[in-house]
Image: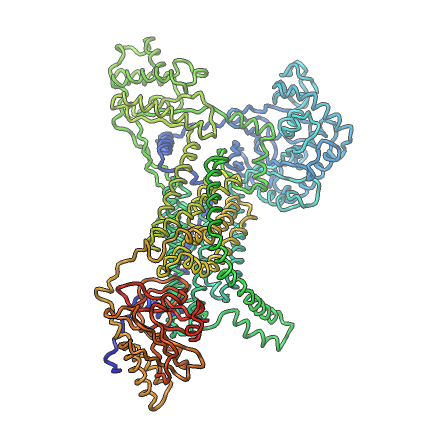
Amino acid sequence: MPRQLVRRRKKTVMQRYAHFLAHHPFLILTLTFCANIVLLLVIVCTDSLPAFDDPQAGFEPRGSLINQRAQAWRNFLERDGVVQPSTRRKATTTKPVAARQNAPVQEIGTGNGDADYDFVEGLRNSTVKENVFSSSGMASLGPITQPRGFFCSRPLLGHAKLILRRKDAGNLLNLEGIRELCQLDADIRRLDEFQSCSEESADTGRLCRTWNLPNYVAVLAGKTSCHQLEEHDIRNVLNLTATCLPFYRSGQLKADCSTSEDDGKTMQEDTITCPGVPTDCIKDSSIYHLLYFISDKESRETGYSSMKHTLAVLPVWSSPAALPLYRALQWGNFTRPDDDGPIQVIGMEMGLGDRLFNTALLEDTLYVGVAAGVVVVVLWLYTGSLFVTLMNLMAIFFSLVVSYFLYVFVFRLTFFPFMNLLTCVIIVAIGADALVIFARLWHLAKTEKDDGRFEKVVHATFRHAAQAILVSSLTASAALFSDIVNPIIAIRCFSIFAGLTVLVHLFFAVTWMPACFVVADKWGSSVYVCGVFAGTLLSCDTKSPVCRLLYRCRCLHSGLRQYCDYFRIFFEKLLPCLVIRLKWMWMASFVLLTVGACVVVFVFPGLQLASGRTFSLWNSGHPSEQYRLLKDRFAFEENRNLNNNEKVSLHFVWGVLALNQAALLDPTDTGITTMDGRFNMSDPLSQIWMLKFCADLRQQTFFDNSTQSDNACYFDSFMLWMETGACSGHSQFPYPPATFIRCVHTFSNSFPQAKHFGPNFNSLHQIDSFVLRLQTSQLFSHSYTAMQQLHQHVDQWFTAALRTAPPSLQGAWFTGDFAFFDLQQSLISGTALSLIVSLFVAFLVLFFTTLNVGVSLIAITVIAGIMLATTAALVLMEWQLSVFESTIIGLAIGLSVDFTLHYAVSYCCAESYEERELKTNIVISEMASCVTMSAVTTFLAGALMIPSDILFYRQLGLFIITVTAISLLYATIFLPACLAVLGPQGAFLQFHYPSCRPLCCRPDPSKLVEKSMHSSAEFDTTYTTGGTYDHHRETKQCFHQSINQPYQGKALRSPSAAANNHHVVVISATPEQPPKTHPALLLDVDPDLADEETDSVGELGSVPTSRGPSRGTSLIRRSQQASRGIFPWDYIMQRLPLSRHFSVAGSSVIYIDADVRSVTSSMGLEGPAVLPNRREDVPEVWVRRTTE
């Protein structure tokens, strides 16, 4: 064939990129590595690392109506540098308490969000002034006498507190229990951490005693130490406590009942402030403290017949300085039930809150590292290359670095919530999935004997893997980005960072990962290196640790490979059989399971909202969480909660616009105050309407008439004052604007109110705003329904009232104690909206990937079932919808859609198969093993997060385990069963993207065949000499004639190939001669040339991720014998098994690498795999060779 007849096709962009990957992998790795190191240095050197000073920052909705009003109210209170007075009340005693000279002095903060104690202030290096901690509404304990020299002072809420119990849950109110508590106190006091931060007595300089049960019993028994107590001492104290208990319950025994102390002299009995209470109960404060602080509710209810829990108050201030002591107790033989000692410290409160959380957050990243390490080992065993696995882990790390750089420096986002750290776990799972897919396709491409040049392997793998990874990454990132519709700030920031990380990892998956595989393939994987060197090392020193390690590495890999056949048989033979034959049973079972999940989520028990004002940060077994759960057993904490149950307050505001101009992604940005320029309270119409408004307000059911007088409204009080004539020169109501302003100013000065309540004046002495404050009749509640009813009632009434107001007053709004209700409402609406958006986005990705409406609908139904089943499982685990849970549930689609997507795409790529069951069989056999391995790595990553002390990490681990297991079952069993029953057959409902090839780019098939002949001639010259070239040229001419003259029925066969059973079926197809009337010619292939590859076949459309084409069809030699049979097209199309699907054009050659006897003699379903092309505009056929 003349060289000028050959027309070479221009390489596509993907082919050029595959060529670059195959020849320059180190360039890609080097450039990518250097770029990421630069970004990492920028982050570190600019001190832009995240800090988690407030773990609950961002747990508020931003943009909701209630939030806008609340933020506008806070800005209004803080304008001009004036802040609303604090509602906290502090009581200070006059008795100072000495502190250790060397103790670190800091202000005492809250222990956590719900331990809202008042701070100890005025703490200095030399002394500690005693401050009584009291929440709003809590009475001071008053002056209390103590036995001189026993306790340094009285217990305060600002002291560190421990909750103790016996490990066998036995009674503490006996001699054995008291002595065990006494010994535990001695063990704690011997700790260096305790001695460094404990208070000292001002008189003796010794460490102050602990306020605990043994010491109070010793005080009441008149002993100087709890070690001196006897059985009768305890019995006498219990009798005294039982005598005083009724007076405590009735309220007669109070904190200020005890006699006071003045220079060591006790006052006479007539100075006792609690008449009727026995003298023994009030001779000092020990009985009251024992009842109020030390004993739990159960012991008080049983009359102190038994006690399971008790409180110990340490002479250590609750502050960050107590962190070493907290750690010593937590990791010593005190808190763990398996440690030595009969007493266990189950709960601790030392005011560490955020400091402790930040420390634990760093420590628990160890679990993330362990999870990554286990995943690395599993992936190493799967891929057979430690180099590729470690480089994939590095790609995951670089993905986090680049996404953080984009988050901070490109998008200029300053708030980084700690929830963003869960992205590490998500990206490990996604990265493992990508590596499994690429490794699987790389292995399939390498097993193709005639794939030819190495870059063809890279191109085939990259083409298929890029599609699968692109689809899964885009779906996951889109599902994560959909959470941006949630109004919670922390969830929005998480959605941005997680979505960015997935997209950045997609870049590494198509650049870094293929280059790593190329390098590993060219220079050898770690397992093969082990195999090469193991034998050498064993021959020199069998005791060498390195030698043994390499040998075990080799043996481990070899042993695992022996089990691969069992897994292959299960996934390719047994599993498809079980799913397809029992498809109706599987469908019914999963449908019933989904219906049951709907009942659990929406009916009973239902997904409940969070019932607490604060959010738990710790695992239920953590000492801080145990204290939060058990603290209400003690009277002083219970009293705080009762006093905190105040009635809901409302503020009606005029003159300020409820505009929140704060950043939507920064909780520290509070915006500015915007005044309402239309507001004019001095207008006569405004005066009349305000007076009517006050009258209507008193008639509402939410108005609390029991605590407010009839003139509680400002205008009522102002009118009564005006009637007294205090403001001279006024006229009748309504008053002229000037008179009204002057009299209001005078009235406000005469009867001052709290700052910003009532009328507020600007610098020109004009009324620029007005605030009306009232207290409702409803107590504050964490119940969503109760607060929703109150808010709706007030909103509907106030909105209707404003419709009748003059224009200058219609810009009013109200706010109140609705922050928690707003959070609950935002969680409900935001979670539902994000799930709907995620489902919609997943459907779009499915459709544009598969281009099949039927498959997309079935797949999205399965995904919805996964979400419902996952949520139902979380409900049964007693999860409540809070910020953490809302974030985690939003991840359901992102983590569950990948498995379903792989099966759906694979099904659609088999459009040339007619039978549903046949399609489903191929889909399961090809995708089940890959999907299962990806699920195993994700499952392990979640399981290793469960031991974490941080609740969010633990919940994330449980969620990953749950969603992975459910997704695997639904995608591998339910989806194939649905496809086997309802899946589209053939190309039904299958769309195709438009192509420009028929217009301008479609090559001439005959020229492609001529090119094939020319390419093979070039190849032959490298292996033959002399006249061999003429012989091959004659062969090519004969072959070309057989293509153009299909009815001759001539069969060509090479003697040299007969023994190797390499055969080719040639079918000519032209528009003039329909394909099904053409015979098939059996041709033989020279085995010496079987590895040659050509570009004679032009690909059309997309193929599944695990399928690759065959090449080398032009290597034909003249046959000297006739074929044993010629088969028509109808036979090939109907009789031979159709096990592979390709949609390609550019050649009319079918290549079969199988024994011809399987076609000519048996004529059964064991023949070679042949697939006709069903596209009318492309009559050529290309079928994958079999490897049997």
Q: Is residue 963 above or below residue 685?
A: below
- Judging depth in this view, the residue of 321 and 833 nearest the camera is 833
- Residue 810 in percent (x, y) is at 28, 25
Q: Quadrant of residue 138?
A: top right
- Residue 776 in percent (x, y) is at 43, 21
Identify the residue at horizontal 58%, vertical 75% (top origin): 535
- Judging depth in this view, the residue of 1021 and 1117 nearest the camera is 1117
Q: Is residue 343 above or below residue 770?
A: below
Identify the residue at horizontal 61%, vertical 43% (top origin): 325
Q: Is residue 451 above or below residue 1176?
A: below
Image-based side of 514 in relation to 1039, left or right: right
- Residue 1007 in percent (x, y) is at 25, 75
Image quarter (top left, top right, bottom left or bottom right) of the N terminus: bottom left
Residue lying farthest to the left in this orientation: 999
Residue 1047 visible at all: yes
Residue 668 visible at all: no
- Residue 315 in percent (x, y) is at 62, 35
Residue lying farthest to the top in this orientation: 724
Which of the colour schemes (rainbow, by chain, secondary structure, one colour) is used? rainbow
Image-based side of 445 in relation to 283, left or right: left
- Judging depth in this view, the residue of 694 and 799 nearest the camera is 799
Identify the residue at horizontal 62%, vertical 16% (top origin): 273
